[in-house]
Amino acid sequence: MTAPTKLLIILGENNALKLTLPLGIPKNVNELKAEIENQCGVSEQFRLQYMDTDFNQFLNLTSTFDLKDMDKIKVIKTGVPETSTGSNESSVSSFNLGSPCSGHNPDYDTDILSSAESRSSSSSSSANSTLRSEAWPLDFRIPEFSFDVELQLTKGNQEFQANGTLLTLKPKLKSDILESLSSEIMKYKAYPSDSNLSDVCQALVVKHPCLKEKGSETGFSAWKISLKYKMSNYRGKLKNLGCSELVINSLKRRGNSNVHPNQVKKPRRAEVNFCPDYPAGETREKFKKKNNDETIKAKMAQTFPHRRQEILQDMPFVADFKSRWPALFSPREINAEFQRITTVPLTSTFMAQLDNNTTKLTKVFRNKGGTSGRKITEIMAAIDENDTVAMRRVCTLKGLAVYLNEDPNSLIKEYQDVDFHEAESEMEKMLIGIYVIKPEGERDLDPAEDIGIIIEGVAVLRDLPDVATAVVLLFGLIYTLNMSYPSNLSRQRETDELNSKRMKQINVLRKSLQEFNQR
């Protein structure tokens, strides 16, 4: 067994203690620092120097192999300048880097005080946020455990120092220690590496030698395995609480069944705040909408003449125009732009007139005969199964298209979500229209997965609530972009003869509505 070792620990001027090491000189500097903390009561961060026999002065201690029994060890508290002279002259100069001279300088003292105050202010502000303030430390500091855990460890360390007896761990005690370590690790990173876990466990058994393991080469092999599993459970608990750095790796969030569960998003070596949480009281939606709507509305109103001049004179492609004016392509701004052009509110006027004439149009549809009448009857039958405002509106619009000898399927294209790639290729060729994506196997009456508007092969609007709203906004976009009604949506050629026939049909419809109004 290794013979006990005694060291002289110099804590400051006229302040020294004797350090007794029953198991001899520790294997590394961290273990020696832990012994000094426990036996000498040093709580601040510090580094060590030893008395070198060759130069007869204190040198920085980097390895315990330089030490022997009865050596002198000097404790240098980092962050607090030493005031002694002579042997610690090098440590004094390390605190005076940047000082214009070696003598006393009041201005320099003031700078140090100001720097300390700024660091204090900075640390307090960072403490109030969820951002990490530092990277993984070179020397991991074991946190203070709860009172009962610290009491048991203190007694265990005393027993170990007296006769070398290791502490018998109870499951509750071990769980509390691992929980505190996991919480401390999370302050630096959510996914510690194998070497990081080794650093933590080594620091644990150095500070609390009573926790060392018998028969282990490192003294903490089992601790390392337990801490690895505890960190996994701790991440799961934080993920359920909404920790952004962990939620981003949940399979439900990623939503891609082809992604392997182990392909997690982890920070790179230099990244400390990889995926921070939003500040208290803030959300992603709040950031997106924060003070933007009114600003955009004012800017769009101010730039209205520029857009109209560009549309009328340059006649740009929709893709180019959308890249230049992205804010325009939203339901709110399309309504606003339509009202700037016509002075008439778009959606409210359109929907009000449609709802007001739905009953009358239904009666007109019933009087329609032939193939068109049968198609209208099939379309309007959907209302009997799902009598909602949205269903009434879309059936009325489709029935009106058939009544005017147009094919509603040429304007409203429906696709299955399983055929989305095929649908995308078709939509790229679409001049103008509305697309509806429905889940596979769902009925026609079930809600759509996505509804949007395509112009010149570009999806200008997505995630619309229903087809009727899409029709209204498409109507507004035709005015906004100064477009003509595409002839390929009509079954008839745009000839004078057929135009005349179309006008007769519209006049008949108008006359029928007037007759119903008079009843």
Image (cartoon, helix red, strand yellow):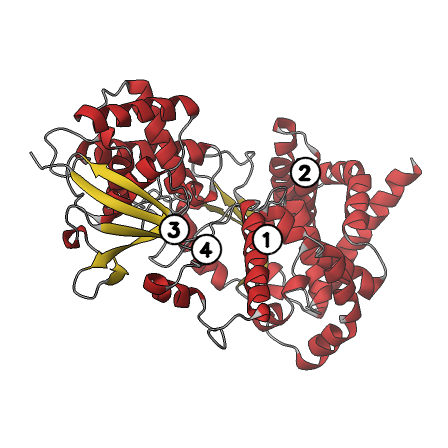
Viewer-nearest of labels 1 and 2?
1
Which circle marks residue 12 in the picture? 3
Q: Residues within 10 Å of mark 2 (few under 14, many from 20)?
A: some
Task: Look at label 4 and name its amino acid.
Answer: Val
Tell me, for residue 489, which label it has, or none: none
Earlier sequence position, callout 1 versus callout 4: 4
Distance in Å between CA atoms under marks 3 and 4: 12 Å
Horizontal relation, residue 504 to residue 223: left or right: right
Location of mark 1 (residue): 121
Distance between mark 2 and mark 4 Cα atoms? 73 Å
Q: Quadrant of residue 330?
A: bottom right
The residue that label 4 is drawn on is 80
As drawn, the residue found furthest toward the right would be 518
Mark 1 is surrounded, within 10 Å at the Cα level, by few (under 14), some (14 to 19) or many (20 or more) other residues, namely: few
For label 3, count other residues whose C-alpha is less than 10 Å away and answer few (under 14), some (14-19) or many (20+). Answer: some
The image quadrant where one finds the N terminus is: top left
Q: Please name the residue shown 56% across and 52% down the image.
A: 120
Q: Nearer the viewer, residue 248 or 421?
A: 248
Which numbered disc, 1 or 2, marks the residue that appears first in the sequence?
A: 1
Q: Residue at x 73, y 64 (%)?
A: 479
Amino acid on which disc 3 is placed? Gly
Left or right of residue 511, residue 304 in this image: left
Q: Which-is-in-front pick, marks 3 and 4?
A: 3
Which is in the foreground here, disc 2 or disc 4?
4
For the residues bearing labels 2 and 3, Cβ distance under 8 angstroms = no
